[in-house]
Image (cartoon, helix red, strand yellow):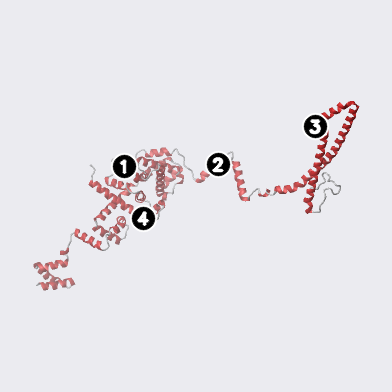
Amino acid sequence: MELPALLERCRQGDDLAWEAFVRQFQGRVYSIATGYASNPDDTRDFAQEIFVRLYETRGRWAPPEVFVPWLVKVARNLCLDQLRRRKARPPAEDVLADEMPDLAGTAESPEAAAIGDSRRRLVWRALRSLGPLSREIILLKDIQGLALEEIATMLRVPLGTVKSRSNRARLELATRVLALDGEARTHPVA
Amino acid sequence: MDCRQFDQRLDELLDGSCAPDRWALAAAHADGCTRCRRLLDAVSGGLSKMDAGASTALTGAVLARTSGATCVSARDRLCGYVDGSIGPVDRELVGGHLAGCPACRSLAAALAEVSAALPGFAEFEPGPGFTARVVGRTTLRPAVPGLPARVAAWWQRAVTRPRFPLEVAYVLTLVLMIAVGDPVAAFRETSARAAAIARPRVEAAVSSVVEPAAVASSDGIERVRSAARSVASLGSTAAGAGGAGKQSVVRRWFTVVFGHSFDALFDRLGETASAVRQVWGAYRSARARDRAPAGPAVSPRAGSGRSEPGTTPVR
C-alpha cells in the first residue's frame, strides 16, 4: 500500500492499517531506538513507546511527503525523553560497546542479527564507541538519510556546523574502524 | 661514428631535428660504447628510475622542508572524494596524495567501507512478537483528538457543570471592572452628600424632642414640687392632728420607692432640668454661630423666642 493511503487509513482508525504501519516502520523505529538506548531491553521499550505515542497522535501526523523525516524527529525526541525520564546518559558514556553482549558477543539480538557479518559488526561497534554528537549526526544523516538542513533544524545548530561535524564524525568513525580492525588482527578471537 | 659525433646526434635528437636513419647509426654506436650508452640512459631517464619507497621518502622529505605534511588537507576532502562530491581537480589531487600516502589510503578505504555499511543500519527487525505487542498496547487506546476537538469537548464539559453560571458571572464582573474601571468610585462621595442632606433633618428632629422635654421637665418639676409641698403640709396637718406617725410612714415609703428622700429627689430633678436647659442653650448658640457666615445671624430665641417643633426648615 502506498504511504499516503496507509497514513490516511491510520488516521481514520483502521486497525489493520495501523498494524501494516507498524510492520512497515518498525525496523526504522527500532534502528533509531538502538542509536539511543543502552541495551536491547531499553531499545524495545523505546520503540514501543514511540509507536504508542504515534498511535495516540495519529490525527496530527505529518503529511506523507515529509513523513519519514518527521518520524525520525519524533522518534529521536521520544528517545531523548525516555533517557531523561530514566536519568540515563547516552549509551556511549554508560556502557562500552565492547561490553554490550548484543553487539560484541554472539547473542542473536535483533541488532546482532541485522548487523550480520563481522565487518558490519565492526563498523557497528565503532559507531557505538563514538561520542554522542558524532553518533547522532551519523545516525541521522548517514543512516536515516536526513538532509543536512533537517538535522541542523533538529539539533538547533548552524548548517555549516552540521556539515563540518558530519565529515569529522565519518572520519572519526573510519579511524575507529581501522583501530578496531588492527586490534582484531593483533588479538584474533579464538 | 665516434663519441663526438654521437653527442652531436644526441643534441639533434633532443632538438627534434635528427632523422631516424641518422639516429639509427647513433644508437648502434651507443650499443657498443659504454660511455655513450650511459649518456643515452641518463637522457632518457632509465638511469634515474627509483623504487616507490625511495620516491615516497623523497616526496616526504621535500614536503617536510617546504609546505609540511598534506594529510590534513587531503582528509578535509576525503569524505567528498569517497562520496564523489568534489570537483575533478580536487579528486585528482586527493588521488595523487593517496597514491603516495598509505595512511590516508587506508583511511579512505575504511571510509568507503563505512559509507557503504551505514545505510544498512537504517532498519533493524525487532524480532518476532514486536508487532503484536505494539498493536496490543495501542489499539485499546483512544486516539488523542486534535486541538479544535479537544477545545469543543472541554467546552461541552464546562457548560454542563452546575457552577458554570457563577463562573460566567464572575468572569463577566471581572471583565466589567476591567472595562469600566473602579465600580466604587461613583459612591465614594456618597457619605458626605448624605450627611449634608440629613443634618438639618436630624437637627430639626432633635430640637422637636429636646425643647418640649426641657419645658415639660421644668413645668413638671414645679408641679411635683408643689404637690410635694402640699403633701408635706398635709402631713404636718395630720401630724399636728395626732397623725405624726402617718407622715413618717409616707416619707419612709418615698424613700424606699425612689431611693431618696423627698427633698433630695426634687432637688435633683431641678438640677437635671437646669442642666438640660443649659445644654440646649449652648447647642442653639453653637448652631447660630455655625450659620452666621451663610447669612445674617439669627438668634435662636428671635421671633416667638422659641422654635416650634417641626417648623425648622429642611434643606
SS under mark 1: loop
Q: Do labels 2 and 4 share a chain?
A: no
| Residue drawn at x 31%, y 50% as measured from the top left | A173
The quadrant holding residue A16 is top left
Q: Are marks 2 and 3 on the same chain?
A: yes
Label 2 vs label 3: CA separation? Answer: 79 Å
| Residue drawn at x 69%, y 49% as measured from the top left | B189
The mark that comes first in sequence, 2 or 3, is: 2
Q: In the image, A57: left or right of B4? A: right
Looking at the rendered structure, the kind of residue marked 4 is Lys
| Residue drawn at x 81%, y 35% as measured from the top left | B264
Mark 2, residue position: B156
Q: In the image, B55: left or right of B154? A: left
Mark 3, residue position: B258
User: Which residue is more in the foreground, B172 or B12?
Assistant: B172
Looking at the rendered structure, the kind of residue marked 1 is Met
Verify CB contact (< 8 Å) between mark 2 and mark 1.
Answer: no
The percent coordinates of residue B256 (x first, y second) are 80, 29
The percent coordinates of residue A164 (x first, y second) are 35, 55
Mark 4, residue position: A163
Looking at the rendered structure, the kind of residue marked 2 is Gln
Label 3 vs label 4: CA separation? Answer: 115 Å
| Residue drawn at x 84%, y 41% as measured from the top left | B215
